Amino acid sequence: MNDFNDWDATLDVWKSGQILLPKVTRWKKYTKDEDTDGGGIVQNTLEHSYSLALLGEILLLSLGKYEPNYDHKLFLTACLLHDHGEGELERDVLYIDKEPDGHVNEYIAFKQRFSTLKTEVYESLEQAFLLQFARLEKAEIARFPKQAQEQIEYLQTNKQKEALAFEALERWDYVLYALEQYKERRNEKILVQVLRNQIPELNKLASLMPGFEEEVWTKKARDWFEQFVEERNGKWIEQKGEM
């Protein structure tokens, strides 16, 4: 009797995240500093993907009364898929160290794994994966293969609010992880460094997204985080390539 091979492509994609995403540890440069700064809770990319999808649902439910017409399916699929490229490459890149070619490499790795699926299935998943890049500048998008560029341009034109929400979600998630380390471990360093990167961007997003300032990046939150950084002015200046 011959083997049953009809589901091989699905099986390969189905198991890849289970195997590869747990191998990628996030926030490495902070988790090892337990003796000096308090360290951080170890989080792998599979755990992150689940928590981001949950946080994404919380975000859309919170924003729904201000903007009820989000493409919920696209957004939550993007949450689940966004780090599969990093899983394939078996590495995570901190915010300060992200480079344009890194985005392209993650897309190529994602495509190599997922494009074995039926075309109509793959194209839908590819679009969701590419949502995370829809806020990039034109020069960065031009680095992608032509097919991906066209998808990203479509998303920029037709899914602008979902792209904004996804960027806001990722930045909120960064702050939440850093806040957790401060609350659980009194790690001030990670919170200061993350906030220096994220406060200006979250301020911009609050002006662009209906409801984000009212529900998430509130005046109370902004004031607290800005004061936290101001009180530690000049401390823990982050550099690229730190290990």
Image (cartoon, rainbow, N blue to C red):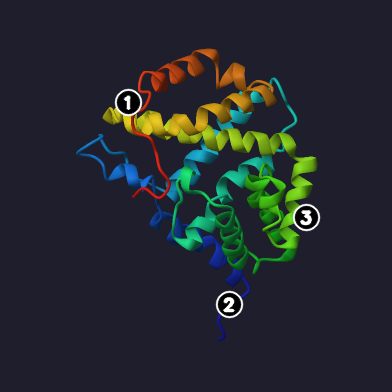
> Which mark is drawn over residue 150?
3
| Mark 2 Cα shell of 10 Å, populated few (<14), some (14-19), many (≥20) | few
SS category of the residue bearing label 1: helix
In the displayed structure image, the side of residue 43 where residue 213 appears, left or right: right
Q: Is residue 57 above or below residue 49?
A: above
Q: Amino acid at mark 3?
A: Glu
Residue that carries the numbered disc 2 in the rendered image: 4
Q: Seen in the image, is 42 located left or right of residue 221?
A: left
Q: Residues within 10 Å of mark 1 (few under 14, many from 20)?
A: few
Asked if labels 2 and 3 touch by Cβ distance under 8 angstroms, the answer is no
The residue sitting at the left extreme is: 35
Real-space Cα separation, disc 3 to disc 2, in angstroms? 37 Å
What residue occupies the far bottom of the structure in this picture? 1
Query: How many numbered discs?
Result: 3
Mark whose residue sits in front, 3 or 2: 3
Question: Disc 3 or 1, which lies upstream in sequence?
Answer: 3
Label located before the other in sequence (3 or 2)? 2
Q: Which residue does the numbered mark 1 point to in the structure image?
A: 183
Disc 2 marks which amino acid? Phe
| Quarter occupied by the N terminus | bottom right
Q: Say which of marks 3 and 1 sits in front.
A: 3
* Residue at the (40%, 50%) spot, across then down: 241
> Which disc is residue 233 wearing?
none
Mark 2–mark 1 Cα distance, whole angstroms, equals 52 Å
Which residue is drawn at the image coordinates 38% and 35% (left, top)? 237
